[in-house]
Image: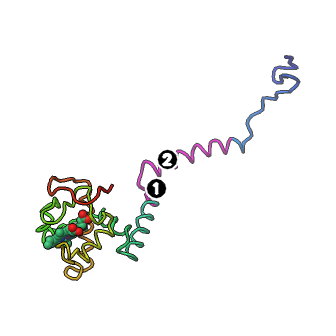
Amino acid sequence: MSSDNNNLRKYDDILEEDNHMPNWWLVILFGSIVFGFGYWLVYQTTESLPNPSAVYKADVDALKKARAAANPTSEEALALLAASPEAVAEGQKVYAGTCAACHGQNGEGLVGPNLTDKFWIHGNAGKDILKGVAEGFPEKGMPAWGPVIGDAKSRNVTAYVLSLKGKNLPGKAPQGDPVD
Ligand code: HEC
């Protein structure tokens, strides 16, 4: 190491000038810090501007609703109904008046199969259940309900049956095959 004066030092033949950081560089540094703090303040600690992830979620929900409205009997639309407390509550009313006599007060089964266990004769996808409700299984003792209760109630009661998934109430012995 050699040194020509106090400010300039030479290491390995490279002269170190010890200048200030250029202003444009400092502006970017402190500007980023101020911006970052402001961003955190606005988006993370206050509700003054909509949070980007909330906006995204709202957009996705709106898209799902629009798709469900365009095709109300699709699996996606039925899953959305099953996630809606109002639709499930409506469906439960229909169920109590129309289905409970054969499937038990809470879906545990009576004449008809237990709708809360994981055994299904005709499948447990939304479209399977809706089809069963609409067309029935006349030769097995379940009438077609579609013409009686109409489309909207058929979908709501399907949402209610979907909401029973995983309840596994003790009741009628398993019928059909296990479905996850
Ligand atoms: C008169 C009696 C009766 C009524 C009322 C009735 N069901 Fe059923 N349901 C049955 C019988 C019996 C079966 C079994 C059909 C079979 O063995 O294939 C069945 C089957 C089903 C299945 C298919 C179960 C499986 O394991 O795949 C679903 C879902 C179902 N019913 C839903 C309903 C809903 C919802 C209502 C009301 C809208 C309803 N049922 C009303 C008698 C009834």
Locate the N terminus by quadrant: top right
Locate the C terminus by quadrant: bottom left
Query: Image quarter for residue 92?
Result: bottom left
Q: Quadrant of ligand 1?
A: bottom left
Q: Residue 36, percent across and down?
A: 55, 46
Provide the residue designation for mark 2.
40
Report the magenta residues as a range. 26-55
Query: Image quarter for residue 140?
Result: bottom left
Of circles 2 and 1, the one toward us is 1
Q: Residue 81, percent across and down?
A: 31, 67
| Amino acid beneath label 2 | Trp
**Residue name at image x 39 percent, y 70 percent:** 65
Q: Is residue 55 above or below residue 42?
A: below
Q: Residue 122, percent across and down?
A: 29, 66
The residue at label 2 has a CB less than 8 Å from ligand 1: no
- Classify residue 17 as left or right of residue 140: right
Provide the residue designation for mark 1.
53
Residue 12 lies in the magenta stretch: no
Out of 30 and 147, give the one closest to the viewer. 147
Can see residue 93?
Answer: no
Out of 43 and 115, give the one closest to the viewer. 115
Q: Are marks 2 and 1 in contact (CB under 8 Å)?
A: no
- Classify residue 51 as left or right of residue 171: right
User: How far apart in space, not on screen, are marks 2 and 1 (Cα)?
Assistant: 14 Å
Counting residues from the start of the chain, the first of labels 2 and 1 encountered is 2
